[in-house]
Image (tube, coloured by chain):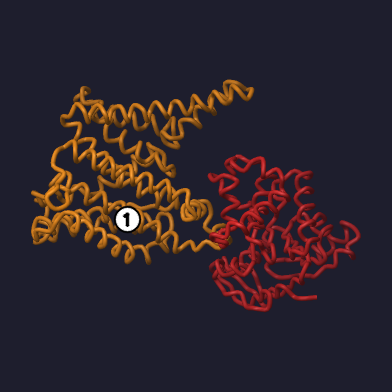
Amino acid sequence: MNLRASTWVERSGNLALLILWGLAAALVIYVFVGGGYLISVLQFAAVYVVFVTGLNIFMGYAGQVSFGHNAFAAISGYTSAVLTTKYGWEPLPAAALGLAGVLACALIIGYPTLRLRGHYLAMATLAIGLIAYDVAVEWGSVTQGYMGISGIPPLGIGRWTVVSDRAVLLLLIVIAALGVLASAAIRRSRLGRALVAIDGSENAARALGIDVARYKLVAFLISAFYAGVAGSLFVHAVGFVSPEVFGLHMVVLAFTMLYVGGIGTFAGPALGALIVTLLPETFRTFNEYQDLAYGGVLILILIYAPGGLTSLPHIWSSMRRKEGA
Amino acid sequence: MTRVLEVEGLSARYGHVEALRLVDLHVDDGELVAVLGPNGAGKSTLMRALLGLVPTEGRVRFCGADVPRRNPVAAAACGLVLVPEGRGIFGPMTVAENLELGAYLLKRDRMEFARRHERVLALFPRLKERLLQIAGSLSGGEQQMLAIGRALMAEPKILLLDEPSLGLAPRVTEEILEKLGELNHNGLPIILVEQKAPLALKLARRAYLMSVGCIAAEIDPRTVKSHDELARFYLG
């Protein structure tokens, strides 16, 4: 294939991804202008963008595995909820204290846990998520158990609160975008390169002078911070929290978003969060076959784009090269 | 001649298996020392043990000071730099990012970074053409050049190379070994682990022959006149 043709192929691959992002942006604008219940769906998607973008730093960049980041969302979410509803704190200081608690817990948990690898690390983090869920259920005097906590005030500073659905969505989109940009900056930094090196080969990274244990812990703390932000945002956006909100379902959903969007890329998780959240709504007219159609599409995506949707340009250009050969 | 590296009674085990047993060796300033031996002789373990990547007993002295045990970061900071078996390049990153990682301990000294970068690209001009290419998409020979280039970015005081010819075509191997000869000629001490003994002996000033985790013999390459003689060293 000549150079001009191969450039065209690259461009058409990029075009596919651009179309996908364009559609996502158009959908956000449509929902924002049109209003309705889809605004709540998008708010949910924006919170998950923050959560999975953080998880991607630990799992995608550093190549580690965690089934327990829902625990950090729960710690932050419940701290915000309890402090604002029971003790009358302002949402921002409550969220800040929740995040401080998340970082302290992540440090205490991460230091011993990150000595484990692979399946052992996965099992240990799964246990952390399950413990957090059980504490939320059993510590009824604080968390109200299964009943949950309602009446959580919306985000705001002093007299200024973000009340309307559109304003909440806008705020969440801005925070999610900042989260993705920060993740991109991390990937391009010395820290990001060190994390990707650890993912490639821990021994090769060590041989270059990279302190593997320290960087794994740093990645764990950053991703826990993102999870904490997502937890606080969720409770203040929805106004309610219960143990189910931060249950195992959250982990499964986050993993799906990561792999559908493209784990290890900085924008993939955000795209995955949008698609995985909005896809069920697209199949609403399928009635009882809605879940079947949703599952089928996810399977098709993972079969034909195993690197996630952000790998589409690469897949497209490989296909065209094969055709041209 | 100054002794750069001195190893005394170095042992290493993987669980119950003793992979290295009381290894003694040394490297003098400006020397290229080959470590030869069949598969499973413990050559790669020796390289990993020198860097502290595996638990060890014994003593490793480098430039007159003890190398801390089980601390590869400190070993790398001392100037002991390894090009691992299988190259260990970071496939999803670009060539430029791989080279930047080589100078990881340099932190923010841009001038020094630029000097090292220029020197590496002058040694391997092919890398210059591929700086923005994903490292995993390079050919085997280019990947090996990148692995050596990345190690040179760390400005090593001694370079440890584990099987640099592995999986490479003879012409590419020759090209790589020629570059190693050039580096050594400019004063860089090198330990070269190689299964292809004749190639390594062409470059080396001295060679150690390893067998089942021990140093079986120290060879002067000038005394090895033929393949038969080399086989005698291997077979005893």
Is A48 on the left-hand or right-hand side of B152?
left
Q: Quadrant of residue B220?
A: bottom right
Q: Residue at x 58, y 57 (%)?
A: B110
Between B119 and A51, the one lying in front of the other is B119
For disc 1, the chain is A
Chain letter for the red colouring in the rendering: B
Position of residue A115 measured from the top left corner of the image (x, y, whole percent): 42, 64
Q: Position of residue A199 (x, y in %)?
A: 49, 52
Tell which of B43 and A111 is nearer to you.
Answer: A111
Disc 1 packing (10 Å; few <14; some 14–19; many ≥20):
many
How many labels sit on residues? 1
> What is the x, y in percent for residue A67?
33, 52
Which residue is at 65% across, 49% downward?
Answer: B146
Residue B168, compared with residue B215, is above or below; it is above
* Quadrant (top left/top right/bottom left/bottom right) for the C terminus of chain A: top right
Vertical order, A65 against B41 (above or below): above
* Residue at figure coordinates x 40%, y 61% from the top left: A217
* Residue type indicated by callout 1: Ala
Mark 1: secondary structure: helix
